[in-house]
Image (cartoon, helix red, strand yellow):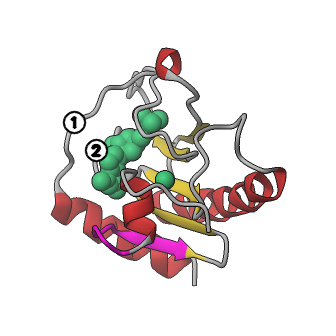
Amino acid sequence: MRTDKDCIFCKIVAGEIPCYKIFEDELTLAFMDINPANHGHALAIPKEHWEDVYAVPDALLAATAETVKRVAGAVRAVLEPYGVNLVQANGPGAAQSVLHFHVHILPRTKGDDLRLNWGLRPGDTAEIEAISKKIKAALQ
Ligand code: 5GP
Ligand code: ZN
């Protein structure tokens, strides 16, 4: 499998650093963002290391899209958000900070006024863990 020893998401895939995992299949992984822009902010990735949308093979893009759809459905069921944005950044100009293809599943609350480049602020890990359990249960 294609991997990058310096990539934080590859380390998560390998189990070398922890995450609040909510879903996994053969090709993809979904887990909570550690700097949530909103409550319930999740990420979906292919397990293989591909930098961005230009590089990721179509089959892995498709597999990730399926996982994104599942997770978005679970997030909607659990949080009943005002809406859900799917966000995917390519390159520094788009504020891509982790160079391993990923899609943000971003629940919205009414009036949250969230901007596209929301900036990274560490979340409350107890809160992230609690919502991860609910979303994970909805994905069983
Ligand atoms: P990007 O800015 O590349 O679109 O998104 C990368 C995301 O990865 C950010 O929202 C950031 O909070 C998240 N992230 C970075 N490092 C970690 C980590 O170690 N664990 C988790 N769960 N998320 C991370
Ligand atoms: Zn990687």
Residue position for label 1: 121
27 vs 98, left or right, is right
Residue found 56% across the figure and 47% down from its top: 102
Cα separation, mark 1 vs mark 2, equals 5 Å
Seen from this angle, which residue lies furthest top?
A: 93
- Does residue 50 appear anywhere in the picture? yes
Secondary structure of the residue carrying tag 1 is loop
Instruction: Give ligand 1's quarter of the image.
Output: top left
Q: Label for residue 39? A: none
Q: Amino acid type of disc 1?
A: Arg
Residue 111 x/y as whole percent? 41, 26
Start and end of the magenta stretch?
A: 15-23
SS at badge 2: loop
Mark 1: is the Cβ under 8 angstroms from ligand 1?
no
Q: Is mark 2 within 8 Å of ligand 1?
A: yes
Quarter of the view holding residue 24: bottom right
Q: Return the residue nearer the eye: 133 or 57.
A: 57
Percent position (x, y) of residue 80?
51, 55
* Amino acid carrying mark 2 in the image: Asn
Q: Is residue 33 visible?
A: no
Q: Quadrant of the C terminus?
A: bottom right
Residue drawn 65% across the image and 56% down it: 68
Q: Position of residue 86 (x, y in %)?
A: 61, 40
Q: Is residue 123 left or right of residue 37?
A: left
> Mark 2 = which residue?
35
**Residue furthest bottom as drawn:** 140
- Cβ–Cβ under 8 Å for marks 1 and 2: yes
Q: Quadrant of the N terminus?
A: bottom right
Give the main secondary structure, helix, strand or loop, of the magenta stretch. Answer: loop
Instruction: Tell me: residue 74, above or below residue 49.
Output: below
